[in-house]
Image (tube, helix red, strand yellow):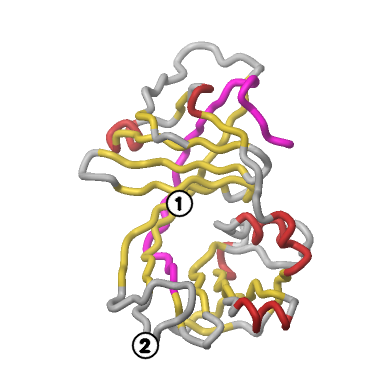
Amino acid sequence: MKPFFLLLTLFISHLVFSQKTYEFDHLLEYEVTYFKDSLRKNSRIFRKTDTTYIKKYLTYSQRNNYRAILTELDSLTFMMDFRDYEGVAFRFKILKSVFYENQLFKVPCELVEQYHNPFQYQVKNYDFVTLTDTIVGNKSYYRYKLTSIRPKKIKRLKLATQFYIVDKEAVEHMPLLDFPTAYEEWKTAPNLPNGLLFETHIIDFYGDLDSRERLTDSQTINKRFVINAPCDYSEN
């Protein structure tokens, strides 16, 4: 998908019915760390040092089939990467001033693409497992993991496991699952607890901490991105 620079049209006039609106009510900031390696591992670049950066998510607390990621390109510009796991994706550059100062935006159809989950078949190979609660800074959090249920594949492919640590006090927020397989598996796991994602981390096959995303800031927002009906490829 080519990253166009979005020329936003603010909706001051009438909205027609042949449109779809994606709402966002949270701007979540996570510190992402990729940890250095102590030994060389097959099929992965050897990391000599820890690498850290900031990742911003736009989420809607009542739905988790879509999310957007804001990546800072420079002091003036974000790259916005939107994905609706039910069929829609778009990616564009947006001025920070435009993003922060406005609430309602139109996304031109030429920026919208149909999204197909390339890992949907993996649902039969993975499952969520609920774990005992964990304590972070004297506060109790829910904890669960997404892991392969095929022991032979785990050993042969050296598969990792992803862990989720979820805030019990923010149960109004549905699980943030920034991975299509995790979302598809979540749809089959109705007992997975709601809650704002505090941390997710990956433990590799060798038992080492591979990477981590930890919440550093949470803001309530009110933003809507609108696409026209001809480019609404979603299933819902």
Side of 138 relative to 133 (left or right):
left
Q: Looking at the image, which residue is at 48% across and 49% down? A: 26
Q: For the view shown, which residue lies furthest in the left direction?
A: 75
User: Is 43 in the magenta?
Assistant: no
Residues at discs 2 and 1 in contact (Cβ within 8 Å): no
Whether residue 137 is situated above or below residue 15 in the rendered picture = below
Crowdedness near tag 1: few (<14), some (14–19) or many (≥20) residues, C-alpha within 10 Å? many
Q: Secondary structure at mark 2?
A: loop
Q: Looking at the image, which residue is at 36% across and 76% down? A: 46
Q: Which residue is mark 1?
A: 57
Tell me where residue 103 sits by quadrant: top left
Crowdedness near tag 2: few (<14), some (14–19) or many (≥20) residues, C-alpha within 10 Å? few
Whether residue 49 is situated above or below residue 195 in the rendered picture = below
The residue segment tinted magenta is: 211-236
Q: Looking at the image, which residue is at 47% across and 37% down? A: 1
Q: Disc 2 or 1, which lies upstream in sequence?
A: 2
- What is the C-alpha distance between the residues marked 2 and 1? 31 Å
Locate residue 83, reporting x and y percent.
Answer: 55, 43
Task: Identify residue type, mark 1.
Answer: Tyr
In this view, the mark in front (2 or 1):
2
Q: Quadrant of the C terminus?
A: top right
Q: Which residue is mark 2?
A: 38
- In the picture, the disc for residue 208 is none
Whether residue 235 is situated above or below residue 205 in the rendered picture = above
